[in-house]
Image: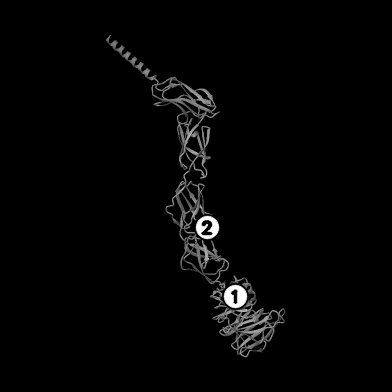
Amino acid sequence: MKNSSKILALVLSILLLYSCQEEAEIEIDNPQFSVAYIQETSQSGVSLSANVYNSGKVEIIEHGFMITRFPIIPRFDNSEIFSIQGAPSKTFEVKVNHSLEATRDYNVVAYIKTSQGYVYSVPEKFRSEGSDGFIFESIDIKNPIYFGDTITVFGTNLSNLIGNYEINFNGIKANVVAISSEYFKFTLPLISDDPNTINYNFNFKISGKTFNAWFPITFREPELYLQNINTFNFIDTVVIRGKYLGSNIQNIENRMLNGQSSSLEIISNTDSLFSFKLNSSFISTQPTVNLTLRNRRLSNVRLFNLNQTELDPDQEIIGEFKEENSYEITGENFNSNIINGETILVNGNISTDFYPARLPEPNKLYIRPNGMLEGRVNQISIRSMGKESNHSVKFTQTNPDIKTSQPNLNSFNYSIISQQANSFNGFRSRKLLTIENAIFEIDFEAQAIVKKMENWSIFNNLNTIFNLQHNDHELYISTYSQDLFDPKFYKVDLTSNTIKELPSLPIKLYKPRRVFSTSRYLYIEGGQLAENVAVLGQLTNQRWRFDLTNETWEKLTNGNFSSSLIIFEKVNKFNNSPMLVEKENSQIRVMKFEENLEGWVEVKKFQNINTSRIIQDFILIDSDVFTIEEDGAYKLNLNTGEANYFSRANYMYQKQINTNAILIDNSKFVYFTQYGFLGEFDPKYLLNP
């Protein structure tokens, strides 16, 4: 019996324990509620409700509804949330009046948020007829403001999904950075702002609802950090720092030396700095520029300084002045960005005789000859940024023929000289010419033509038969008038400044083949006769001499001139002996007059010569005879008999020579050209053939 009681007690205990376990399993912690009921849809929104079956055992924090676009399942992180704080009663409902677009399908769930998480109903689908949407209240804009700053917009009916916000400022999309039920924030995008614009356009589109308005904005002005202005070379990249620059530097305008403007090449540009090249010419080492950024023009702004361009000292160029040649000049800080950054000066003056051959390097300038450089030796310098270089380059032309220094012609122009000037044969110690009614002497050191003697009654309207310089101060001149062919003969003494008429020539001579003098006589050999001023006569082989002491003419035996051509030969006096260079029968003969023989003797003969070229003049330098011809020059060595022809000597000026006005100056030829300048031919600059 006692054991039976124990068994019964054990059974009852087991039954009681089982009963308690069943009660623990069916206890509900989370609330139970219905789906979201669509009570009503209209253009102002949708009315939602839900029934609560069991509030559960855990704390309820809030309840409400979540809506997403169909077919997305609404959850906390992807939904528009319409919440009510605290625990619901048996029924809860919400009128949704924003974030719904008409004719769009949505899913909605009811939810209750507990201390342990969210509890959701199954989703219900509905089609929206629209909603009232966002209501603007106010806007908070900094003053002044700048791109990237935050603007806050206050309002109601705001979406809690950042993806439902589309903000545009003056047509540029802005970035939304924060949202709440009372406001949203966005950063001001970069635009091309205008200092003359006050009101700017804002367009807010939230869940399909748009609000458009204009609000006044004051932008911050750009600031440049220019307390310490740096100095650059042309090759450098200039970097300027600042803030509020806008990342859109529009132009950096520089005024050049010629008064025109150029734009410097912008390399990079951010909101806090910009960089550019110095690809222009500048008026000084402290230039100012006109800077345009953010539609603001800042005039005469000094952004940078420049190091002065300078030539290296002690430079010399010795070479031919020819366009195909290029010469290198070294120095510091040449403008390697542009080809005409430096102005080339010759003897301190702006010149077109040189131009850049190609783009400079920072330490090298390349120049090319152009036109006609005047003078054998010139100083080349540059002008950069308004200042001439301290150093210059000595340039020595090695062309045999050059344009020489131009004397002051007083009242004469080159056309008169070209047509009427006649130089003197013979002694050639002075640079003498007859022009119209006077005798002139060129003074190259003073760069002037000096009138030595004038006599209207004798020289006016006369044509020259010959001009002969007998010695350093005595001249013999034969002329004829333009009206009557009556040749006259004069002696001119430059020391006493006197003119004496001598017995006329014994024959009517247009031009002698040769005219020369010795210590006792003046000789005329051959030439062409003249019937009158308009009709030229035959060639003559007659030879005459004039006794300089007795002032009488004497006929000599005729010459034996084999050439039937009209040749007027130069006879020059060297070492007090008349000499000539004769071309004939493919040979050149250098001849010397022997007065005791009353004839010419051969000094040296040169074979296989092109005799079609006419010798215009010649000079004796040591043992070499140099001829100047229409298209070249000969070098004739009297010791070796070697003849060298230089055809390159004509490439500039020799075809332009006025053959009646060739002078000899210190072992070189100086001649008037037909195009208005004096040329110089210096035989020592002839190159080897």
Question: Would you say residue 630 is visible in this rendering?
Answer: no
- Number of residue marks: 2
Quadrant of image for the N terminus: top left
Image-based side of 658 in relation to 216, left or right: right
The x and y percentages for residue 130 are: 54, 28
Q: What x and y, as percent, mark residue 291?
A: 50, 51
Instruction: Give left or right: position of 388 versus 59.
Output: right
Q: Amino acid at mark 1?
A: Tyr
Q: Earlier in the sequence, mark 1 or mark 2?
A: 2
Pick the front one: 443 or 38:
443
Neighbourhood count class around disc 1 (C-alpha, 10 Å): few under 14, some 14–19, many 20 upward: many
Mark 1 secondary-structure assignment: strand
Which residue is under mark 1?
671
The alpha-carbon separation of the residues under discs 1 and 2 comes to 42 Å
Q: Amino acid at mark 2?
A: Met
Q: Is residue 528 above or below residue 107?
A: below
Q: Give the crowd class for mark 2: few <14, some 14-19, many >=20 residues within 10 Å.
A: some
Residue that numbered label 2 is attached to:
256
- Which residue is pictured at 37% across the width and 19% down the height? 24
Q: Secondary structure at mark 2?
A: loop
Would you place residue 351 above or below residue 463 in this image? above
Q: Nearer the viewer, residue 326 or 155?
A: 155
Q: Which mark is residue 230?
A: none
Q: Name the quadrant of the C terminus.
A: bottom right
Splitting the image into 4 quarters, where does residue 403 fall? bottom right
Instruction: Report the residue at 54% width, 55% height from top.
Output: 261
Q: Position of residue 681 (x, y in %)?
A: 57, 74
x and y, in percent, of residue 428 in the image: 58, 81
